[in-house]
Image (cartoon, rainbow, N blue to C red):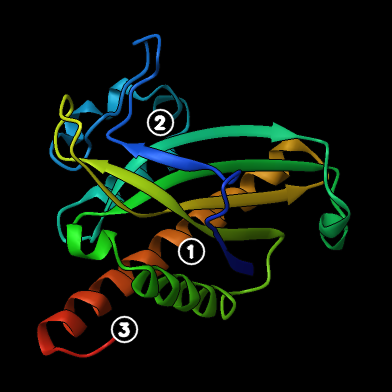
Amino acid sequence: MDADFSIELGHDDPALDFPWRDPTGQLVYVDLKRHPEFISQIEEAVKFPELAEFLKATNWEPNVFASAKCDVWTTTELSAEEDVFAASHKFSIYVDLVFSDMARRISLPLHESFARALVELLRRAPEIAAAAEFCIRRCFFRKGNETEEISEGFYFTVYVNGYGDDEVNAQKNWVIAMKLVENAIWQLSARLEAATSSGLSL
């Protein structure tokens, strides 16, 4: 499986306010960490059970993450770099993830080492027409929904793409890739907790 990570902290790069709210008030952050029963409020998760499973797994209490945003889409517009998959269709998702612990949220070295470890794990996975990318970006954490007190830290945008000669096959490869990424995050979450308890690095 193709996997890579990037660090995007430039002025024009995407950033996240957490918790977030759409300016219109129609869309708001759904706290699945504390309220997993609210997953029915996320339209994409209702439509795609594989996404719902991924969100439940990454927000489940033993995991070190909470999800912030997500989206799913399909396209036939592929970049030149994606020619290696010999595909005409791409089925894609992004999920924004933040560490649950504030001390971890503000550590850029931890984000980088976690992303690097994820990439190493996924590159050992069976070869399939799929790719994952982990983008480390700037996040502004508010201590409450209404307070202006902000701590600056980081978050991951996780992209998972499945490729195929039609949408059905692209989605099939995406489903496999989602499970591989989910398992890798679980494995490294457990490793991080063990390392923290023993005072070792990831």
Q: Amino acid at mark 1?
A: Leu
What separation in Å lies between label 1 and label 3 (alpha carbons)? 20 Å
Q: Secondary structure at mark 2?
A: helix
Q: Position of residue 159 (x, y in %)?
A: 56, 51
The residue indicated by pointer 1 is 180
Q: Is residue 132 above or below residue 22?
A: below
Nearer to me, 149 or 196: 149
What amino acid is at disc 2? Ala
Q: Is residue 120 above or below residue 7?
A: below
Amino acid of disc 3: Leu
* Residues under numbered marks 1 and 2 in contact, where contact means CB atoms less than 8 Å apart: no
Where's residue 164, x and y in %?
A: 77, 48
Vertical comparison of 107 with 70: above or below: below
Residue located beneath label 3 in the image = 202
Which residue sits at x=71%, y=45%? 169
Count residues near mark 2 (Cα–Cα under 10 Å), then give few for <14, some for 14-19, many for 20+. Answer: many
Query: Is residue 67 positioned above or below 121 on the image?
Result: above
Question: Earlier along the polypeptide chain: callout 3 or callout 2?
Answer: 2
Distance from disc 3 to disc 2, alpha carbons, whole Å, reads 31 Å
Q: Between 30 and 11, which is closer to the camera in this rendering?
A: 11
Q: Identify the residue position indicated by label 2 in the image.
A: 45
Q: CA distance from mark 1 to mark 2?
A: 18 Å
Earlier residue among tags 1 and 2 = 2
